[in-house]
Image: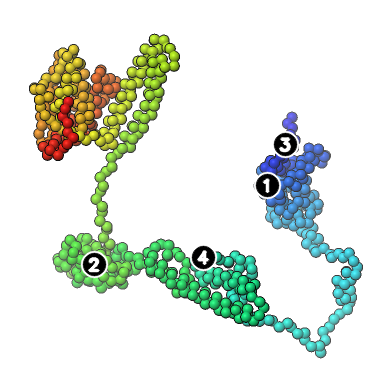
Amino acid sequence: MHFDDRLATVLRLPPSGDGLARIQFRQLVDILGRAPNAREPSETVDAGFTRLQELGRQIPTADRARLLRAPLQAMTNPRLLAWLAQAEPDVACAAIRAARLDDEDWLALIPALPVRARGILRHRRDLPPRVEALLERLGVGDRALPPATYEDDAVATAAVPDFVSAPDLEFEPDPEAPLPEEPRASFNAPTGNIAVDQDMSDDVLELLGMDTAPPAPTSLSDWAKARAAQQHKDLQLKAANADHSGDGRSGGANSGEAGIGAIVRRIEEFRKARAMQGAVGASANADANAPRLPLGDTAPITVRLALAIDFTTDVHGRIAWADGPYASSVIGLSLPAAQDGGANTQDLAVAMRQRLPLRAVRIAVAGAPAVSGTWQVDAIARFEGGGFIGYCGRLRRPSPPMAPPSAPAADTAEADRMREVLHELRTPANAIQVAAEIIQQQLYGPAPHEYRALAAAIAGDCAHILAGFEELDRLVKLETGALPLDEGECDLARVLAQTVVRLRTWTEPRGSSFALASDPSAASLPVRVARAEVERLIWRLFAALASSTAPGEALELGWSSGAGMACITVALPSVLAARDPDTLFEAVAGERGQSLATGMFGIGFTLRLAVAEAAAAGGMLQRIDNALHLSLPALTTVNADNSTSATFSP
């Protein structure tokens, strides 16, 4: 069995505030409105109606009516409807509108409803026919006026005329009696005060009241109403300060005349201001929709230019027919006479004599504003019966000159996404490296040596990964032009000699080397690149080549200068020379650098980064046969003479 204890649950909650009181009122109306109309009394239902009565005294009428107008469920309980119908008119109207009773409940409830509630119920159009018939029968008594009641018989006798107490007495008019005088209609002469003459009430004048800086009106009636309100206030102020002598009346007339004159002057000023505004901003779109005064205040004329006109000419090139609303403005126009002499087009008169087609011939038309200006003529000759009868074509406005296409912007979207990915990868790598260094250095306490060794290896791997991320970020910036190289000067030969000396610690134990034709420190190759950038590029390139050499392998190395470039040529190791030229500068999956500057992405990525650095410096790194050729912009004699910051010291 299921027991409905919703009503008891709601009644257990005390309405401690206004919000809770409204919520409980809404809940009780919904629950009691759907409760069956039980014949037997119920203490819980009675308690619910008692709580509703208490809430009705606490909640304002407007709020209760609003809650009843939006019920969660239809109201089907006659008892609740009868109770709400006895409340205030707004509450009763909302309850009757939300009620959904069957025919028997309506027929049993309507006779017990108050007269006012039955009047509200008659406005519903969804009632059954039997209910409407019952309302009509009861309406005979509902709509009659109740008889007057008097507490004193003397008052009742005095209130009833004598002819009412004697209904059988008939009154006949006396033909000799004079006609009763009708009251003469009084005529008030105009006072000059528009507020008094138009019989404006104080409420209307208060609404029309304006301060010393009123907004600009848009019609004559607004001016009149505003001035009437101001005049009324002035008259009231004067009447309060003046006595009841004749001077006050004459002052009122004079002020009325002054008020009318002021209105006329204000209207004239308004018209002048609007005329000046129309002359200044005749082409503005807002002026076309602005309201106008009915005193000759017309909108400025907007000229719409014709864009294309079809036409035919006679044998002399004069337009004989045209199509469109501007035909009358161009008929009779001679095309040869209207040709624009300054235009670089074909000679129109010569072309017409030779019956040639007219292609983009420019003419200048002087006439009506809609057709004045430069036109472009496209036409062909017409023939009839073997004879020339003229041209037919179209006049069109020339197109505006096209702007030269702008240089396409570099597509940096892919590069930006790559840099975002690198940023997301750096965060966990940095966190892992920091944690590994904490364990390895025992910053938070002693740790076993095995853990310290593992932490040191992890920290080294993280440092290797972060270095690879830095190289990848540098490559992306260089290839998109977001990272320019530092400007400066240095000696490329000195940097090359120092790099070869530093690499001997790697090449001599392996028996490999760089075969030099001469000592590079004795040569001079000044370039227009900062020394730090050149050292980074040369070390990256030659360290990658040295790490790829086989034991006992020697790489030929040479340098030269010419054509404004300083060049270095170095042979490729046999391992790299065997690669396809297209894949030499590409990263190979799974390739890890052995040592030195190859990085975590391998030798191919390192060479590609060197190519990007050389290109950013204004030079080039390319493979020719089995050798790499690096060229950087040389520092010319003029540049060297003008330079004061060049340093060639190792």
CA gap, disc 2 to disc 3? 91 Å
Residue holding disc 2: 364
Q: Is residue 485 visible?
A: yes
- Which label lies toward us, 1 or 2? 1
The secondary structure type at the circle numbered 3 is loop
Whole-angstrom CA distance, mark 4 to mark 1, is: 46 Å
Question: Which quadrant of the figure has residue 519?
Answer: top left
| Quadrant into which the C terminus falls | top left
Q: Which residue is mark 3?
A: 13
Which quarter of the figure has residue 625?
Answer: top left
Residue 514 picture location, percent across and down: 14, 19
The secondary structure type at the circle numbered 4 is loop
- Residue kind at label 2, given as amino acid type: Ala
Q: Quadrant of the N terminus?
A: top right
Q: In the image, residue 199 lies at what x, y percent?
A: 63, 73
User: What residue is drawn where x is 59% and y is 76%?
Assistant: 193
The mark that comes first in sequence, 2 or 3, is: 3
> Crowding near pointer 4: few (<14 within 10 Å), some, many (20+)?
few
Asked if 110 appears above or below 528 in the picture, the reply is: below
Give me the residue at 58% from left, 70% from top.
229
Residue indicated by mark 4:
213
Determine the secondary structure under disc 2. strand
Quick one: label 1 or label 2, which is nearer the N terminus?
Answer: 1
Q: Secondary structure at mark 1?
A: helix
Looking at the image, the residue that sits furthest to the right is: 153
Is 638 placed above or below 107 here?
above
Labels 4 and 3: the sequence-earlier one = 3
Q: Residue furthest top?
A: 449
Residue closest to the eye, 29 or 143: 29
Asked if the residue under mark 2 is in contact with the one under mark 1, i.e. CB atoms within 8 Å, the reply is: no
Q: Which mark is residue 67?
A: 1
